[in-house]
Image (spheres, coloured by chain):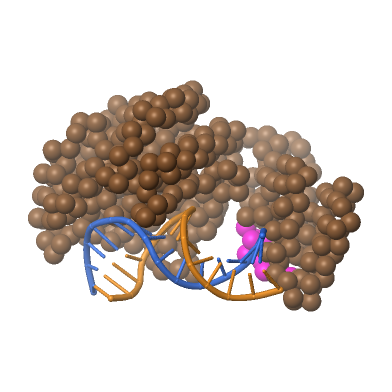
Chain colours: A brown, B orange, C blue
Amino acid sequence: MKIGYACLTVGVPNTGMRTCTMKNARSERFIELIGNNLDSLENMIDYNIRNGILLFRISSDLIPFGSSPVNSLKWDKIFEERFHAIGQKIRRSGMRVSMHPGQYTVINSPNEDVAKRAAEDLEYHVRILDCLGTGPESKIVLHVGGVYGDKEEALRRFESRYRVLDDGIKRRLVLENDEKSYSIGEVLETALKLNIPAVYDNLHSKVNPGGSAGGDTYWIEECRKTWKAQDGDQKIHYSQQNHSKKRGSHSDSIRIGEFLEFYGRVSREDLDIMLEVKDKNISAIKCINSVAAGKSIRALELEWSRYKYLVLQNSPAAYLQIRKLLKDKTSYPVFQFYRLVEEAMMTESTTGSSVNAMQHVWGYFKDVSTEKEKYRFLKLTEDFEKGQAKASSVKAFLYRMAVKYEEHYLLDSYYFI
DNA sequence: TGACGTCAAGATCCG
DNA sequence: CGGATCTTGACGTCA
């Protein structure tokens, strides 16, 4: 059982994907960007290994214009060794990586040109995974596509287009239900017919349940039948509704109570859960810690070191409660811990509590900073208290200080995200 | 023709 | 000048 996250790692330096616009699309630029992106990928993989995250989706942005004729670079050859080194880390750690072309890769389009580009895009994704040397359990997730006024016909077109895809694509391709057009029931029908593993997405299914009823456990059980031995463990997507956005929008963070309720119903050793959530790795660690019974409290102390100044900023009351909660070193009060963190995140910070947190962070620099820096901090906090400066400006300054004085404890903090 | 979603590049504004 | 903030780009479907 693995829990993971998609594409980007938040709050970790040098993990960003860079790209360029069409008008800057030149080989030299590509080489520079790909080099940067492979470094970022490696940093994300390293981070995942350090944090026990063994399920990860690699961003499609790894190679700029990777599936476009604009990029004719032999990037697989040029960066062969880099791919190999990163692939080795993935394989040796037992990490399972996947990819997921976006909503614009449409294999069943009536437009032949669109379908052809979609197939090329799938080839691009396969090439990345092949370069990394990952096995057939390393999947590429795809949606069925559009409806075009005739779903039967659109499904038939998906079928015929699928049949002529390369075997290299077929051994990795898996089909996911979407929130608009193809419900999990419809996806399953096609998946069974074409022998493609089906990925159940709980939120998509809630928004687009299709005709037949059936809950999470029912559909996961049905999808399980489409996963063969060589496909690896069954994989699902899990996300939660963002209540302040439109239906189907992913939440900023995973609400732990809601997750554990779901997990309690569906969990099994041979099921992998890919989280789709805005705060990515942060929620992944939260969920991993929460389902690990009897982990050492050190795991929570590590989490506390990342959350504490953010909690202090929003809710000094929660801050004190968590400190109390973590006093008993023989306990593992993971649920209460994350509930208190969530409570703090829902609390609006006051000017006073914000300044208090800023001063706690400043404490790291009090003795090492220059006079100019001391003055700057004083001025910034005064301005903030008078409403003449934003909290983000003060925090940006504190972050630069943390970088300059290499305060790793602070650099790992969620306070700056 | 614009909304949809996603992210960063690119442009512009501000002190 | 640097940092913060707004706009654009790249993709295909659908109203």
**Viewport quadrant of the N terminus of chain A:** top left
Q: Nearer the viewer, residue A202 or A333?
A: A202
- What span is in magenta? A342-350
Q: Quadrant of residue A199?
A: top left
- Counting from the top left corner in percent of width and height, residue A240 is at 45, 57
Q: Is residue A321 visible?
A: no
- Counting from the top left corner in percent of width and height, residue A160 is at 11, 44
Residue depicted at 68% across the width and 64% down the height: A392
Residue depicted at 33% across the width and 51% down the height: A102
- Counting from the top left corner in percent of width and height, residue A296 is at 68, 34
Q: Nearer the viewer, residue A257 or A201?
A: A201
Q: Nearer the viewer, residue A185 or A366?
A: A366
Residue depicted at 32% across the width and 43% down the height: A71
- Counting from the top left corner in percent of width and height, residue A301 is at 72, 41
Does the magenta portion include A83?
no
Report how many numbered discs are placed on residues in the image.
0
Q: Nearer the viewer, residue A212 or A123?
A: A123
Residue depicted at 49% across the width and 59% down the height: A251
Q: Is residue A104 above or below residue A404?
A: below
**Viewport quadrant of the C terminus of chain A:** bottom right
Q: Is residue A393 visible?
A: yes
